Image (cartoon, coloured by chain):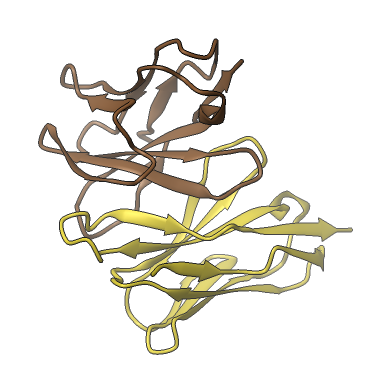
Chain colours: A brown, B yellow
Amino acid sequence: EPEVTQTPSHQVTQMGQEVILRCVPISNHLYFYWYRQILGQKVEFLVSFYNNEISEKSEIFDDQFSVERPDGSNFTLKIRSTKLEDSAMYFCASSEGRGQGEQYFGPGTRLTVT
Amino acid sequence: GQNIDQPTEMTATEGAIVQINCTYQTSGFNGLFWYQQHAGEAPTFLSYNVLDGLEEKGRFSSFLSRSKGYSYLLLKELQMKDSASYLCAVRDTSRGGGYNKLIFGAGTRLAVHP
């Protein structure tokens, strides 16, 4: 069964450093998302991406965040200058259609900022 | 505004039936999802309702009443492995283009005891 994959599974970085989290969505899916979950809290929407551009972003997704689809398979989330409060699980998801069907989540990347 | 409420914790006995309720208030609505999440793992899709009524999928069923802003997830023949968090999520369309943004509740931690 096709699945969303993410690398790395765990990333430790120092405050102020840049990190890039990588995702490979399901191959025939056209809509991609990033969510985050701070430990013990709810899953929060960050950004959705379609046709090589952001379709929506949340208030969390400020100028420190960016997304990119550098090739036909990868979808990345970059945090330019990490803060302690960026420590969380980051989940990539993809869906086939825009207003229908479910979103499939990847296993997540645990980001720890020290 | 957006608000999704579900009980924080529930306990049940192996072999029993449990119902997890979810109420929501969102500016836009295009479907309600239930996900299961084990600690430290990604949410996995369980069920999806866009029209009123009951959707059955094996041991899991989900009900939706759009007029009441209410859904429930019913788990039958509970097994120990069903101990997990159950997340209610609404696909929110209030900001127009982002038809696929999911807004999650805080989740219900279910503990199944022998």
Residue nearest the observer in this picture, A82 or A37: A82
Say which residue appears at 23% left-offset and 31% top-offset: A27
How many numbered marks does the figure carry? Answer: 0
Query: Residue B54's quadrant in the figure?
Result: bottom left
Residue nearest the observer in this picture, A83 or B2: A83
- Residue A85 place in picture, x, y as percent: 55, 30
Say which residue appears at 29% left-offset and 33% top-offset: A26
- Residue A69 place in picture, x, y as percent: 20, 23
Say which residue appears at 27% left-offset and 26% top-offset: A66
Residue nearest the observer in this picture, A12 or B36: A12
Is A103 rendered above or below residue B22? above
The quarter in which the C terminus of chain B is drawn is bottom right
Is A99 rendered above or below residue A56? below
Direction from residue B1 to residue A98 in the image, left or right: left
Is A71 rendered above or below residue B3? above
Say which residue appears at 32% left-offset and 79% top-offset: B51
Query: Residue B75's quadrant in the figure?
Result: bottom right
Direction from residue B40 to residue A71 in the image, left or right: left
Q: Residue furthest right?
A: B114
Q: Residue furthest bottom?
A: B67
Direction from residue A33 to residue A40 in the image, left or right: right
The quarter in which the N terminus of chain B is drawn is bottom left
Query: Residue A60's quadrant in the figure?
Result: top left
Residue nearest the observer in this picture, B44 or B25: B25
- Residue B103 place in picture, x, y as percent: 41, 58
